[in-house]
Image: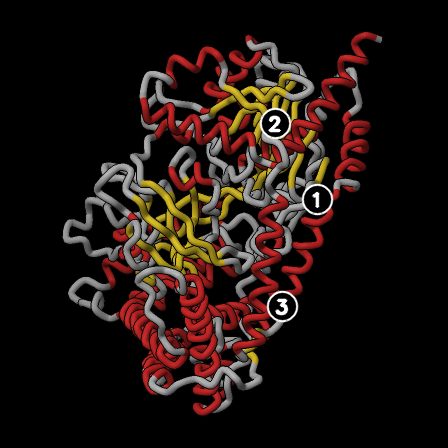
Amino acid sequence: MMSKKFIPVILVLSAASFFLAFQSQGKSDRDDPKSKYTKVIKNVGLLLEQGHYSPKPIDDKFSKLVLNKFIEELDGDKNIFLAGDINGFNKFENKIDDEIHGAEFLSFFFISKVYIIHLKETANLYKDILNKPFDFTKDEEVMLDREKLTNPRTESERKAIWIKRLKYLTLERYNSLLEEREKSTNKPDFKFKADSTLEREARVAIQKQIGRYFATKITRENEAENFSTFVNVITGTMDPHSNYFAPVDKRTFDESLKGSFYGIGAQLKEDDGKIKISMLISGGPAWKSGDLKVEDEIIKVAQGNESPVDVTGYAVADAVKLIRGANKGSEVKLTVRRMDGAVIVISLRRDEIKLDDTFAKSFIIQSDHKIGYIYLPEFYIDFNNPKGSKCSEDVAKEIVKLKAENVDGIIMDLRGNGGGSLPEVVKMVGLFIEDGPVCVVKGREEKPYQWKDKDKSVLYRGPLTVMVDEFSASASEIFAAAVQDYKRGIIIGSTSTYGKGTVQRSIELNPERENSLFTNNELEDLGSVKLTLQKFYRINGGATQLKGVTPDIIIPDRMEYLKFREKDNTSALAWDEIDKSDYKTWVSTISNDIVVKYSDKQIANNATFNKIKESISWLENYTDKPTSLNLIKYQKEQKQFKAKIIELDNLYKINKEMSVKNITTDMSVINAAEDKIEKNKQMLKRVSNDIYIDQTVKIMNNMVTQTATANRN
């Protein structure tokens, strides 16, 4: 649905397009970036002010936010711009809003020009710095937390910052080489290398890495690319999910490692010059291993036992070429840095990624009671095929199979589920409740619209739990919220889900560009904006935006202290509420509150979860401190850090594997193909060793026992 208020905006954009086309007849300003960029920001401003769900005023305050965010986007580590540059940019802090409204467009060109000049200046520093040995006996520190950094006042201060930065990178590499030498001492082909040799090798490696980093950065971050960043800062200041897409978007580096070749089943993204995991394909090698995580940074890629290639500074597309393989079963080793700073090597075997790997799957967990487990990686639907797969239908089939196995309760696992089709969410909630509203959608100046389950039938009436985490977003949050509001089941997970409660739509900035009147393509392609038009609300009236869903039972999570949820973004839309919908809560023989209180007490007294909380707190404090550039102190810090990571990893391993098996009727399909047999083994192992599933099963056992007792009475 489109906001009624938004329809005139399309007409205004169309009229503007006609005017610009006829005005420019006989002229050629297409090669004039200033003219085109002026049109873009003007149209973007119009869309934001007239079409956005909850627009902030584009005024002096907005202008200052845009200026500061653009500077941060260009130089987040504060090692390119000088303090004097920042002071010089401040003359635009009350001007950008005027430029969006039609004043002469100057700010971007001025800032971008200064940035490109300083970027090239900075790129000339590293060779001279890295040509000389570092002294790792000095008692120095480097602060890596960008929020605690300030811009240098002089060129000499900037060079000093880069000396410490490069010294830190070299120290990391040097220490790794020292560790490798120690591990290799007893190997037959071992050749001793002196400390000075290893220090030199470390500097040479970092010199290549940084050279590649600057070469990529200088090539990519030209004026056109910086303008795309500038416009995205404008849209992102309105809210994090409104984005600008240039006609040729050079920043679209995400590429799925699947298709007609063999891969690991992951998607990569570029994030501040780093290559990170953006998504794992359910059932793929990366997902099955359980080692690779979303937001992990890929540092090196190795083909089997070959020497690893350092991909720091690589474009994502180039890194993908290294990770892809021509042969099924070939080995690729990824050296990754986790969000908590741990560096590990993950060995994966390439495989063909098939679509059915992403579909709903179910298993039976035999504990005190027989528990059904359904994993749903996303709320999928095949829009191009009416007869194609739909998650609501697939989940319904899994429930029917689990009921035939006489399970005593069902777990719905939505961890890592980033969302998907809203109609499918509504249908899926309907499998567990009688008819009624599931969520409410509201556009700007529109009356709230209820999405309802109109089917009075209930497929499953037994005990239900829903597992979520900080990566459960959008549609996952709607499902969890509905189950919670109806008191239909118990939500279990980290302190909150992600908190994305907004709806976007892509809008062309020149909607009349393809009009038949313009046979010579007089209207330029100005790109498009993915614009936030609506907001989701729970049936209890509260938004899922910002706050997400707070589980009924909270289990300590190692990602908890990291700031990446919606609430951690200063531009995120606020939480609010509307009138509560009319709905009847689920009538149950037991009280969810009793189960929750009992489970909270169990978790509070659980030694493993308490140790996890202690380790998480230690890691949070560790990452806030500066890092020593003294070798002995650095090694001591690293020893403590690695020990804590190992301790944390061991805490996530359950003492005794759960008994997990397939549904009987699935075995014929699984046994029909060798690749399905192997994938199934991996998935069974993953489920059986999951500490969170183990705890959820214990909660389910309590629910089932209380239900049985209540029914007898």
For the residues marked 1 and 3, what is the alpha-carbon distance in whole angstroms? 23 Å
Give the mark toward the camera: 3 or 2.
3
Q: Secondary structure at mark 3?
A: loop
Which disc number belongs to residue 624?
Answer: 3
Tag 2: amino acid: Val
Tag 3: amino acid: Asp
For the residues marked 3 and 2, what is the alpha-carbon distance in whole angstroms? 42 Å
Residue 408 at x, y = what percent?
Answer: 65, 15
Tag 1: amino acid: Phe
For the residues marked 1 and 2, what is the alpha-carbon distance in whole angstroms? 34 Å
> Quick one: 411 or 287, which is closer to the camera?
287
Q: Name the residue at 59% across, 45% down.
A: 470
Give above or below for 355 relative to 273. above
Give above or below for 648 relative to 668. below
Q: Is residue 227 visible?
A: yes
Q: Earlier in the sequence, mark 1 or mark 3?
A: 1
> Quick one: 264 or 203, which is closer to the camera?
203
Q: Secondary structure at mark 2?
A: strand
Q: Earlier in the sequence, mark 1 or mark 2?
A: 2
Circle 2 Cα neighbour tier, 10 Å, few/some/many (<14 / 14–19 / ≥20): many
Give above or below for 123 relative to 74. below
Please give the residue where the numbered disc 2 appears in the rendered image.
438
Please give the residue where the numbered disc 1 appears in the rendered image.
609
Q: Name the residue at 62% across, 57% down.
A: 644
Image side of residue 105 versus residue 622, left or right? left
Q: Secondary structure at mark 1?
A: helix
Residue 428 at x, y = what percent?
Answer: 54, 23
Q: For residue 711, which quarter of the picture? A: top right
